[in-house]
Image (spheres, grey):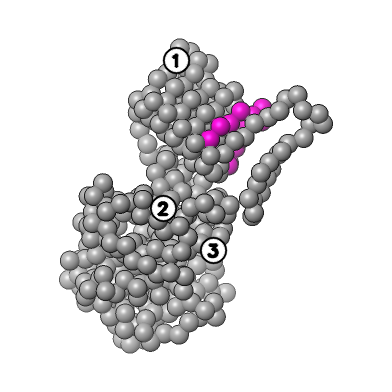
Amino acid sequence: MMKGVILSGGHGTRLRPLTHTGPKQLIPIANKPVLFYAIEDLRDAGITDIGIILGTNMPNKIKDALGDGSRFGVNITYIMQGEPKGLAHAAKTAQEFVDGDSFVMYLGDNILKSGIEEFVKGFDESNFSSRLLLQSVEDPRQFGVAELDDNGKIINLVEKPKEPKSNLALVGIYLFKNNIFDAIDKIKPSWRGELEITDAIQQLIDDNYDVDSFVVEGWWKDTGKPEDVLDANQLILETISTDIKGELEDDVRIKGRVVVDEGTIIRSGSLIKGPVSIGKNCDIKGYVGPYTSIGDNTKIIESEIDSSIVIGDSYIRSDKRITESLIGQNTKITTDKDAYPKGRSFVIGENSEVKL
């Protein structure tokens, strides 16, 4: 029976300061942690035995969020990788869990529109040792790139090539049979000091094993950077349907597709212009514009916000519109109208950018 392996280690350095306080795989996209989408993709493809590979960045937060997997209809086993030493090293830590079965390896910060049902179909019965999910990209020099023969079989892989021979990038979702572990044992660390999964797959090819390709339809996002998280949020919000469970006071205007969860109050005079998702127990008075997700227990008073994610448990009261922002949990943003001189005060983590 095919198993699933989701990689949830890594330090998320490109998403600091948010990842100082939690793993990047728990950052919410349309008010649902990105890791949940990966689990649901595997479940919907009929894969219910899932190993979650944990790193050193607050692994207990992932355990607390997922539990035993029963809430998703799956069974979860936790596998400690420790310090991240490359994707192939992470795969190797799952060898005992896989126990001879074929498996999907899914990078936990990836999100797909189309799911993986078609991707996994027929793999167990095939003669292929691996199948890679690919997507055409505008600048393949930023990715691992696959070169195919006329039958769609992969004949070569190059990581971030200066002169790409195709525009097909590796998405970060892989199918393997058990001989991938022999290939991993043969490779050496790269210049980064890591065991690269592209090197292990190339080793399969060099050992005359066949590697198949599957080009994904629809969009794919690697949510490794703030702008990618916001893009993914927009793409998911495009798919929502209106669902108002909270309370709308008189003279509230709702335009477009809007989700308002239980316990939330939208105050009189507010305009919510979808697609927008607002979580539980929020208090909103003002303007919430398109492509915005507001997490649970957030208070937004006499403020305007659009194209943003507020993770939750936050308070916002600002005379400046907030746009294209990723706002961490338990954040307070206020404007002191009486302050002189007219300055702005912030408590900002490292690797942050402020635009006023």
Q: State yes or no: residue 318 in magenta.
A: yes
Give x and y (percent) for residue 352: 64, 51
Residue occupying the point 47% across, 70% down: 83
Q: Based on the displayed image, in which of its 4 quarters is residue 276 positioned?
A: top left
Numbered badge on residue 249: 1
Q: Is residue 56 left or right of residue 14?
A: left
Q: Secondary structure at mark 1?
A: loop
Q: Nearer the viewer's eye, disc 1 or disc 2? A: 2
Q: Based on the displayed image, in which of its 4 quarters is residue 351 positioned?
A: bottom right
Q: Which residues are magenta?
A: 314-325
Residue occupying the point 81% across, 29% down: 340
Question: Does residue 309 show up?
Answer: no
Q: Amino acid at mark 1?
A: Glu
Q: Nearer the viewer's eye, disc 3 or disc 1? A: 1
Question: Does residue 116 show up?
Answer: yes
Query: 10 Å neighbourhood of mark 2: few (<14), some, or many (≥20)?
Result: some
Toward the right, the furthest residue is: 341
Residue with the mark numbered 2? 61
Looking at the image, is 188 positioned above or below residue 348?
below
Q: Are marks 2 and 3 in contact (CB under 8 Å)?
A: no
* Along the line of sight, the residue nearer the viewer: 164 or 26: 26
Q: State yes or no: residue 196 in magenta.
A: no
Residue occupying the point 33% across, 66% down: 79
Q: Are marks 1 and 2 in contact (CB under 8 Å)?
A: no
Q: Secondary structure at mark 2?
A: helix
Toward the top, the furthest residue is: 250
Query: 10 Å neighbourhood of mark 3: few (<14), some, or many (≥20)?
Result: few
Q: Nearer the viewer's eye, disc 2 or disc 3? A: 2
Give x and y (percent) for residue 311: 49, 41
Marks 2 and 3, the one that precedes in the sequence = 2
Numbered badge on residue 139: 3
